[in-house]
Image (cartoon, rainbow, N blue to C red):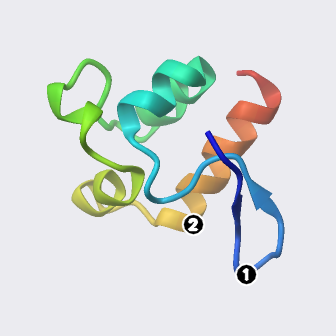
Amino acid sequence: MSSHQDFRSGTARRIGPETLVGELMNDYRATISVFIRHKMMCIGCPVARIHDVEEACREHGIPLDRFLGELDAAIAGGS
């Protein structure tokens, strides 16, 4: 997965809004806990392989920027 520039903070993100949820959880297992913490039932969902992070956040009413930050923190911390 490529890095993405956060246009507000200027920091590089490991993932972006268009990152597919299934690929994200497969490539970075530590992100699964973020989905669970937000009560997002994306784990094991057949749509996760075609759904991106932005769509998932919109459907679950979760602020995208904050969620991306939490995903990046999970990836960086490995937890």
Badge 1 local density, few (<14 within 10 Å), some, or many (20+)? few
Q: Are marks 2 and 1 in contact (CB under 8 Å)?
A: yes
Residue 65: numbered disc: 2
Who is closer to the viewer here, 7 or 79? 7
Q: Nearer the viewer, residue 49 or 42?
A: 49
| Spot occupied by residue 22 in the image (x, y as percentages of width and height) | 37, 29
Of callouts 2 and 1, which one flags the residue occurring earlier in the amino acid sequence? 1
Q: Is residue 71 above or below residue 44?
A: below
Return the residue nearer the eye: 13 or 40. 13
3D distance between C-alphas at marks 2 and 1: 10 Å
Residue furthest left as drawn:
46
Mark 2 lies on a secondary structure that is helix
Q: In the rendered view, tell whether residue 7 sits above or below residue 36.
A: below
**Identity of the residue drawn at 27% across and 33% down:** 48
> Which residue does the image show at 61% across and 39% down from the upper left?
1
Question: In this figure, which residue is indicated by the disc labeled 1?
Answer: 8
- The residue sitting at 56% across, 56% down in the picture is 16
Is residue 41 visible in the rendered image? The answer is no
Determine the secondary structure under disc 1: loop
Q: State which quarter of the image contains the C terminus.
A: top right
